[in-house]
Image (spheres, rainbow, N blue to C red):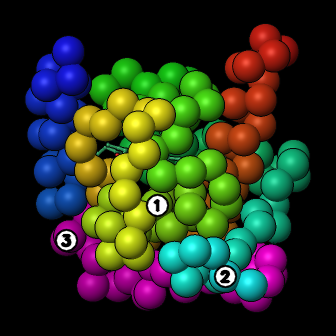
Amino acid sequence: MAWRRLARCRPLVFACIALLGACSTSAGDPGAVSDAAKAGGANEHGLARLRNPLEGDARAIAAGRDLFAGKACASCHGADARGGMCPSLVDRAWVYGDDDTTLYHLIREGSAGMRAHGYVRGGAAKAVGDMPPLGSAVSEQEAWQLLAWIRAHAAAESTGTR
Ligand code: HEC
């Protein structure tokens, strides 16, 4: 089963990297983060602890929902984020962890970025391949909007109040 998921996801990963590579020259530092998101201190990987400044914000959640479709997240994770070809974002199983610090860096720097920070894949979520680095397509603010929507959506999914 695992190899099937990998085989289905991988071409998309490559296509996406190729696509993003074309415009990555305009990218700033994808690991950069504003002071507003810093929660103080550092995690075990030496990354500044982050807290989503837009968590629970209704406008950010709505913007994040649109970005999820517009930034190609949905093409890998499914329109409702339930997974499809790549991991579900609503199943409470996380590859590297569920905290804002981890997910922010994963979205902007991809799986390779996580490895560079010393993260290793955990066993909880199904491993299907690498997520591409999306920092050249997704700004810091957009990453927080996306995470605000993912959190709200996952909470609604798990309680059936969607
Ligand atoms: C080319 C396919 C692809 C695209 C596009 C993509 N992802 Fe991913 N995503 C993945 C894969 C594969 C993983 C698992 C990474 C790993 O195991 O290293 C992942 C992991 C994640 C995770 C952690 C999931 C978990 O269970 O731990 C989040 C959150 C996430 N992606 C959000 C996003 C967002 C937001 C976008 C759009 C900006 C996006 N992804 C675009 C393939 C993709």
- Camera-side residue of 130 and 43: 43
Query: x, y (%) of residue 29?
Result: 44, 87
Residue 17: horizontal and vertical position, in percent?
21, 59
Which numbered dot is residue 106? 1
Report the magenta residues as a range: 20-40
Q: Nearer the viewer, mark 1 or mark 3?
A: 1
From what the image shows, is residue 41 above or below residue 14? below
Q: Which mark is residue 87?
A: none
In the rendering, which numbered label is found on residue 22? 3
Residues at marks 3 and 2, CA–CA distance in whole angstroms: 33 Å
Tell which circle, 3 or 2, labels the residue nearer the N-terminal end.
Answer: 3
Please identify, in this view, whether the residue under mark 2 or under mark 1 is nearer the observer.
2
Of residues 122 and 60, which is closer to you in this image?
122
| Location of mark 2 (residue) | 42
Query: In the rendered structure, which amino acid carries the disc numbered 1?
Result: Leu
Q: Residue furthest right?
A: 57
Is residue 80 toward the left or the right of residue 152 in the image?
left
Residue pictured at 21% horizontal, 23% vertical: 2
Taking the image as drawn, is residue 136 in sight? no
Establish whether ligand 1 lies closer than 8 Å to the Cβ of label 2: no
Amino acid type assigned to the residue bearing label 3 in the image: Ala
* Residue 73 on image: x %, y %: 44, 43
